[in-house]
Amino acid sequence: MKPKTKILIIAGSDSSGGAGIQADIKTVTALGGYAMTAVTAVTIQNTTGVNSVIPINPKDIAKQISFTCKDIKPNGIKIGMLQSSKVIISVLSALNKVKNSKIILDPVMVAKGGAKLINNSAIKTLKNKMIKKAYLITPNIPEAEVLTNIKIETLEDMIRAANVLLNFGAKNVLLKGGHRKSKYMEDVLVNKKNTKVFKSRKINTGNTHGTGCTLSSAIVTFLSCGKPLKKSCELGIKYVNQAIGSNPNYGKGHGPINHLNSITINKKFK
C-alpha cells in the first residue's frame, strides 16, 4: 500500500512507546500515512511514570524540521511536546519557512502519571505565539484550565474555555472531555462560526496512555488526505475509541492503547 499523505511530527520521544512521537508514528502509519519526525526531547518513562526529560537543543530541533521538509514536503504537521520558550520560538522560526497551513497543536503539559512536561515560561509563549500559528489546537481539560484560568466542570464550561482559546488566535479548538466525570465522552469542536459536540461511550479502563497524542495525529492524517475538519475530528475520535477498547493491557501503570486496531493484515502475512 502506498502512503496517502506525508506528516511531519514535532514532539517528544516516549521510551515506553505508548505516547509522544512513538504513538504519533504508529497512528500516522496505521492510518495509511508516511511519518517524518523532529524530536524535541527524550523522555525516560514507562507506564508508571516519567523518570527524566532530556531536552534537545532548540537549534537542532529547527534543523530537523527544515532539513526534512527541504527534501520531503509534508501535507500536514502535528506539534506535541514543546518544553521551553526557546524551543517554541525555534520551532516557529522553522515553520515560517515551511509554509504549511494544516498544523495541529496538541499543547502537551502533563504526562498521564502527573509529571509536568513544560515550564511556566513556555506556557506563556505557547499562549502568546504558538496557538495563533495552528489551524487546530487539541487541549484536554487540565491543559485548557491552565491556558484559560477557567475551572472546567460542565459542557458549558468547556465551550466557554474553547471560546477564550479562540480569542488567543486559535482558528479551531477541539477541547477533549475525557477528564470529566460523566457517563459519556463529550469532545467539543469550536470555531467562530460553529460548535459541534462529539458524544461517545466512555470506556472504563486504566489503559489510556497516549490518547491525546494519538488523536491529534489521527486528525492531521485525515485532514491532510482532504477530509473536512469536522469529519477528521469525528474519524480521529472513533479511531482512538477503538484503540482504547482493544488495548493490549501492557505495563503496571497507565497502559498504552492499540494503534493497530485500524489495520487488516493481508492473508499472505498471516
Image (cartoon, grey):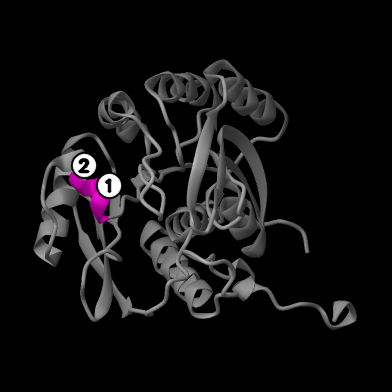
Magenta segment: does it hold 47? no
Residue 128 image point, x, y percent: 25, 26
Query: Disc 1 and disc 2: Cα gap in Å?
Result: 5 Å
Q: What kind of secondary structure does the magenta stretch mostly adopt?
A: helix
Asked if the residue at tag 2 contacts the one at tag 1, i.e. Cβ–Cβ closer than 8 Å, the answer is: yes
Left or right placement of residue 179 versus residue 2 in this view = left
Q: Residue 27 carries which label?
A: none
Residue at screen point 66% across, 47% down: 35
Vertical position of residue 21 compared to residue 33: above or below: above
Left or right placement of residue 108 versus residue 72 in this view = left
Q: Mark 1 points at which residue?
A: 143
Residue at screen point 31% across, 35% down: 131
Q: Which structural element holds mark 2?
A: helix
Residue 166 image point, x, y percent: 20, 42
Q: Quadrant of residue 152?
A: bottom left
Q: Mark 2 points at which residue?
A: 146
Residue at screen point 12% across, 42% down: 149
Q: What kind of residue is marked 2? A: Val
Tell me the magenta residue range: 141-145
Mark 1: give few (<14), some (14-19) or many (20+) Cα within 10 Å. some
Vertical position of residue 192 compared to residue 81: above or below: below
Q: Which structural element holds mark 1?
A: helix
Magenta segment: does it hold 142? yes
Q: What kind of residue is marked 1? A: Glu
